[in-house]
Image (cartoon, rainbow, N blue to C red):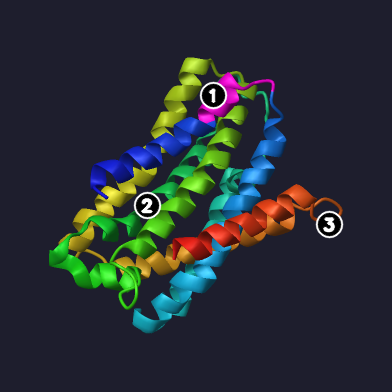
Amino acid sequence: MTLLWGTLLLISSVLVGGGVVVFLQNLNRGKIIKVLLSLSGGFLLAIAFIHFIPEIYAHGSEGVGYYILLGFLVQLFLEYFSGGIEHGHIHAKDTKGTIPWSLFIALSIHSFFEGMPLAAEFLGEASEHVVEHVGHHHHHSKGEGVQGLLLGIILHKIPVSIALMTLLLASGFKVSKAWGVLFAFALMAPLGMIVGHYGAKNAFFNLEIILAVVVGMFLHISTTIIFESSENHKFNFIKLVSLLVGVGLAILAI
């Protein structure tokens, strides 16, 4: 997969979410968000435990657990400003057509960081050791782990973008302005991927550490999705099936 294709897939996943809101207004978007979130939550949790955490500990730097914990806490901090939109919380207020900048910045920071480890897919033979540390190198071709990460990010971005577009329109944004904000958000993960690509290539930072932070962020998001997707502490059957499908997809992806 090329850098261009990775960028297009990330941007398209956000635009698909926006399209669901704008063009399918008669659907129950709340239920769609919950089902997709359960799917992405199961996927992220499974791929974190089955694939990335074992790989990080097997090949990562000393004290990698601290970076995973840091990612968990960073996501907790970001959600203080985003209002939990990453896992489906929509709090529409009369903002008179102005974007809540704290929400947008928090979402953008999250998206930027989760895009950075994807750089390992595109570093090429010159940096193969970086790719091997991020993806399986015993029984899988290089980059397969990163492709699983890309799929997880795409699955998660669709419901998040549905929630964001719903919030923007409910806050009085014109459709054209809402699309502009959504497109700006869509660029954050590709930007992180590009920065990660050139930063790692020139030894500015360590993708293993960044991946550990992102995995910690995913652990917070996925567990929150699972616990908050229940009604009266009981899973809706469809949500439970979606969660298990997400777990199954993660197993197939690795």
The answer to whether 194 appears left or right of 23 in the picture is: left
Where 196 falls versus 12 (above or below)? Answer: below
Judge the density around disc 2: few (<14), some (14-19), many (≥20) Cα neighbours within 10 Å. Answer: many
Q: Position of residue 162 (x, y in %)?
A: 58, 34
Where 4 falls versus 65 (above or below)? Answer: above
- Tell whether position 104 is magenta: no
Q: Residue at x 46, y 31 (%)?
A: 15
Q: Which residue is mark 3?
A: 234
Q: Residue at x 62, y 44 (%)?
A: 36
Judge the density around disc 1: few (<14), some (14-19), many (≥20) Cα neighbours within 10 Å. Answer: few
- Whether label 2 touches label 3, CB < 8 Å: no
Numbered mark located on residue 115 in the image: 2
Q: Amino acid at mark 1?
A: Thr
Q: Which residue is mark 1?
A: 98
Check the picture and name the quadrant holding the C terminus. bottom left
Judge the density around disc 3: few (<14), some (14-19), many (≥20) Cα neighbours within 10 Å. Answer: few
How far apart marks 3 and 1 lie (CA) works out to 37 Å
Where 237 falls versus 203 (above or below)? Answer: above
Check the image and name the residue furthest to the right.
232
The answer to whether 126 appears left or right of 113 in the picture is: left
Q: Position of residue 63 (x, y in %)?
A: 41, 82
| Main SS of residues in magenta | helix
Q: Quadrant of residue 90?
A: top right
Q: Position of residue 88 (x, y in %)?
A: 65, 43
Q: Residue at x 64, y 23 (%)?
A: 170
Secondary structure category for the residue under label 2: helix
Pick whichever, 73 or 1, lies toward us: 1
Q: Amino acid at mark 2?
A: Gly
Magenta-tinted stretch = 18-26
